[in-house]
Image (cartoon, helix red, strand yellow):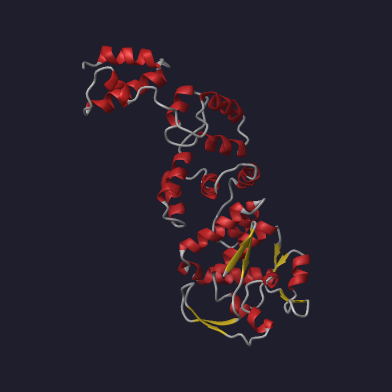
Amino acid sequence: MTLKIDEYDFDFSLPRIEKKVGNSHQDFEVSTNANLSFKEAAIRRDFTINAIGYDYFKNEILDPFGGMNDLKNKIIKHIDDKTFVEDSLRVYRSVQFVSRFEFEIDENTKILCKKIVSSGELKFLPKERVFEELKKLFLKSKKPSLGLNLLKEFNIMNIEQNLEEIDNLAFILKDKNYDDFRKLYLFYSCLCKGMNEDETYSFIKNLTDDKKFIKNILILNETNLTNDIKILKRLSLKLKLEDLIVLNQASKNQISLEVFEILKSLDILNTPIKPLVLGKDLIKIGFFPSERFKEILDFAFDLQIEDDLSKSNIIKKITQQYKF
């Protein structure tokens, strides 16, 4: 059970014993036992800093594995060799903890993580669970590069390029009122910079099946920022142009400030350009709804973008080009 207070999540569970019975992340036999001591119950926790308790009645901290000392020294350390390796998701959890809290990982814990990776156990993890751990890495870290470097050291992801840009992006996004979905596809777009379309698709598809998420990343990574107003107007129909601005700011591309002002003046920073001529305008001047409407409206939109014509002049061109 999870209790949320403000931005904090508090998890509650009964003391339990778990036994791994298969390869899947869910292949555990679980039995609750209210008579377990705190130490017996906590030994199956992942890290010492997550095995600190509080006895309300005695008003004392319960710390059987030295978690308080590791917390003070900023160390991510596993509790028990045998139980730690039974849950391979803990490799990703250690990575996101290192990144979020800017802690060091204990050398013995690092050795166990590498052992899990080399055993091939990670392939049995549901990609949704992996995606959630990486989501925490990106959205809750000031320096996601810390975790990404550890993923490289563990031979999980060979990420070398773009690490500085990703940290720059984290700094920029902390002041943006974007939802998590948007922030996350921006991080992955930055992460995949330099990959071709097939490589990007394959990389992201291994983490999520969300078609909109994948599409946003592919579009961003095939699009270059420009100060050409006509191109920008058309691009506004495909993506939120502020996304391009933010990614270019992260890479310290100087053109981003100039383009930002252009987009603000055109009011297409986060919304597509609005067509001046609509179907109701064609009906008003005498056209009957037909299959030609799309062709005529496309013609009108081209005039709006390419020739920067006013609505009245576009309608005039339509009446010259098309018969009622």
Question: Is residue 277 placed above or below 236 in the rendered structure?
Answer: above
Left or right, 280 with reference to 27 = left
Seen at 73% across and 79% down, the residue is: 64
- Expressed as whole percent of the image width and height from the top left, the position of residue 128 reads 47, 61
- Residue 224 or residue 72, whichever sits in front: 72
Q: In which quarter of the image is the N terminus?
A: bottom right
- Expressed as whole percent of the image width and height from the top left, the position of residue 73 reads 78, 65
- Residue 2 or residue 129, whichever sits in front: 2
Viewer can see residue 196: no
Left or right, 278 with reference to 73 = left
The image quarter containing residue 186 is top right
- Expressed as whole percent of the image width and height from the top left, the position of residue 9 reads 62, 63
Question: Is residue 281 placed above or below 205 in the rendered structure?
Answer: above
Count every numbered label the image shows and give the total: 0
The image quarter containing residue 44 is bottom right
- Residue 223 or residue 10, whichever sits in front: 10
Question: Is residue 119 placed above or below 96 in the rendered structure?
Answer: below
Left or right, 311 with reference to 120 = left
Viewer can see residue 19: yes
Seen at 29% across and 19% down, the residue is: 284
Question: Is residue 208 placed above or below 106 in the rendered structure?
Answer: above
- Expressed as whole percent of the image width and height from the top left, the position of residue 54 reads 73, 75
Q: In which quarter of the image is the C terminus?
A: top left
Seen at 43% across and 54% down, the residue is: 205
Farthest residue to the bottom: give it: 35
- Residue 268 or residue 120, whichever sits in front: 268
